[in-house]
Image (tube, rainbow, N blue to C red):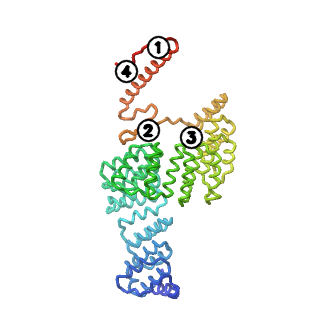
């Protein structure tokens, strides 16, 4: 660490002549209250150095407050090395200064330096505050470190029930996929705010546990917690993936009722929800009302059109967005290639795929190759699809090989199916669907020995067939049912009703059969309907 006198000469010696300063700020800084305003106006490193030099020439270099503000300004400007240099000159850094540096290290993927700084902070007897642990969590690179911070929060009685620190912990657990630990912590919190609720809902949605995310959202509403835009985006994503139209419509009505501005992300989420719930007309109406139609919004609309088989319309919108000055991104190409796939537009799909690199400078990723392979497979061009998979610049994943296997099942192409299955047994050894498809392909060709072999592989590898399940939304609640499921609280009444429905269907089928027989064999006979009594 440099002594203050040495540091003074070091910084002053390296300052250029005043004439070289960008937008000179060289008005002497005294103990007047304008120095912080001047600091806020700095935009270049040389300006920060100039202000720092003036700090050094005055008693301000002895003030932790002023130096901490300088550190914060340097951190916000992105000059981490210089910020650390100033920090190391502070004889007794404040909690604010430590927090600022820890935050900076966490957001710049230098978490180990942030953790080291926290250790130094405690060794120097500097107390943590309610910002320290949230910033420290951002410096953690794994669950083990985060659980260590959790232990520190629990030990420090000041923060063991403090909402800011506990909310940061739930968000941390969710970000690493540990929704179970996040939920345990969430349920034990004495107080929760909108950030807490949104964080845990986002965690469930991110893990594709959409039903639980919607259940939490309903609880959030019942508790009267104010809902923000991020909450709405998260829940719309869950609705889109579950087909929960009623809840999605409630969100749309809520935005209208509360006059919430539909920014591009929220607008895109609404369009995506309506598209995936089968209402592309409503999706388009939302699109037309949005004041700002950025790339997110166009992507959602093109994706919805693609899903419903409006390939030509999707391509038309793809061209229109470019005409409006919106540059397509990687997601745009996934959507428009998907449109070509679902609508059988093979040549147009090829053209768009090859234009990515040539016209837009976008290197196709694994998902783009997946769409392209799907286009070829749906068109029956299995050999061409196989060549694309074998020659792509990255390692093919299970999705691509699975697409080829499905196409081989439709075409009964055993040779390519075996090639795909060989890879899938390595990539997805426990995916029962792949084995069933391969077995069916052999069965079509009457290769019963191979059918028996596949079944033996499944048995020996303990590959179990996953039971089918379905979802239904009733009164804003999503219910899930599996084959032979008796877990639902209303199972008894549901099965009683199903039995009555089956009887009614059978009676109707018998009646129609009789009518057809009478019409065919002899003159018409008046038959009394059983439902008229």
For the residue carrying disc 3, how many other residues have a C-alpha within 10 Å: few (<14), some (14-19), or many (20+)?
A: some
Task: Confirm or deny contact between disc 4 and disc 3 (CB under 8 A).
Answer: no
Label 2: which secondary element: strand
The residue drawn where x is 51% and y is 54% is 298
Q: CA distance from mark 1 to mark 2?
A: 44 Å
The Cα–Cα distance between marks 3 and 2, rounded to whole angstroms, is: 24 Å
Would you identify the image quadrant in which residue 135 lies? bottom left
Q: Which residue is mark 1?
A: 524
Q: Is residue 14 above or below residue 309?
A: below
Q: Residue furthest top?
A: 522
Q: Give the Cα distance between marks 1 and 3.
A: 58 Å
The residue indicated by pointer 2 is 471
Q: In the orientation shown, which residue stands out farthest toward the front?
A: 523
Q: Which residue is mark 4?
A: 531
Mark seen at residue 489: none
- Who comes first in sequence, dot 3 or dot 2? 3
N-terminal-most mark, 4 or 3? 3
């Amino acid at each position: 660490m440099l002594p203050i006198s040495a540091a003074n000469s070091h910084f002053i010696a390296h300052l250029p002549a005043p004439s070289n300063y960008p937008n000179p700020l060289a008005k002497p800084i005294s103990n007047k209250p304008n120095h912080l305003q001047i600091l806020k106006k700095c935009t270049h490193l040389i300006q920060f150095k100039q202000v720092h030099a003036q700090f050094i020439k005055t008693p301000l270099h002895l003030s932790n407050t002023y130096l901490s503000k300088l550190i914060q300004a340097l951190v916000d400007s992105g000059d981490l090395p210089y910020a650390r240099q100033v920090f190391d000159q502070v004889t007794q850094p404040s909690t604010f200064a430590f927090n600022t540096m820890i935050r900076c290290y966490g957001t710049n993927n230098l978490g180990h330096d942030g953790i080291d700084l926290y250790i130094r902070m405690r060794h120097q007897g500097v107390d943590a505050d309610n910002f320290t642990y949230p910033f420290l969590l951002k410096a953690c690179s794994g669950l083990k470190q985060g659980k260590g911070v959790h232990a520190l929060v629990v030990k420090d009685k000041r923060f063991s029930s403090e909402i800011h620190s506990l909310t940061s912990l739930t968000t941390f657990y969710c970000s690493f996929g540990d929704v179970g630990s996040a939920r345990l912590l969430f349920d034990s919190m004495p107080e929760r705010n909108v950030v807490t609720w949104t964080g845990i809902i986002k965690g469930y949605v991110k893990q594709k546990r959409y039903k639980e995310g919607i259940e939490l959202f309903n609880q959030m509403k019942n508790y009267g917690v104010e809902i923000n835009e991020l909450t709405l985006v998260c829940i719309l994503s869950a609705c889109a993936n579950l087909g929960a139209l009623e809840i999605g419509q409630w969100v749309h009505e809520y935005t209208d009722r509360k006059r919430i501005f539909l920014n591009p992300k929220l607008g895109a989420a609404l369009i995506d929800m309506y598209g995936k719930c089968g209402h592309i007309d409503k999706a388009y109406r939302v699109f037309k009302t949005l004041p700002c139609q950025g790339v997110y919004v166009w992507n959602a609309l093109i994706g919805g059109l693609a899903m419903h088989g409006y390939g030509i319309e999707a391509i038309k919108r793809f061209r229109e967005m470019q005409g409006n000055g919106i540059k397509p991104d990687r997601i745009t190409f996934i959507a428009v290639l998907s449109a070509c796939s679902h609508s059988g537009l093979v040549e147009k799909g090829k053209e768009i795929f090859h234009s990515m690199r040539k016209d837009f400078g976008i290197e196709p990723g694994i998902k783009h190759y997946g769409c392209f392979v799907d286009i070829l497979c749906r068109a029956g061009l299995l050999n061409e699809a196989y060549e694309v998979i074998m020659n792509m610049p990255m390692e093919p994943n299970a999705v691509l090989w699975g697409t080829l296997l499905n196409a081989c099942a439709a075409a009964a192409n055993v040779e390519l199916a075996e090639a795909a299955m060989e890879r899938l047994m390595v990539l997805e050894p426990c995916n029962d669907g792949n084995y069933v498809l391969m077995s069916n392909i052999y069965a079509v060709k009457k290769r019963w020995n191979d059918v028996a072999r596949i079944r033996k592989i499944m048995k020996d590898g303990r590959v179990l067939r996953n039971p089918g399940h379905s979802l239904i939304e009733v009164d804003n609640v999503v219910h899930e049912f599996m084959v032979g499921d008796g877990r639902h609280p209303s199972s008894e009444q549901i099965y009683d009703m199903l039995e009555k429905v089956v009887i009614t269907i059978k009676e109707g089928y018998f009646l129609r059969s009789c009518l057809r027989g009478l019409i065919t064999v002899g003159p018409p006979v008046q038959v009394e309907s059983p439902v008229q009594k």
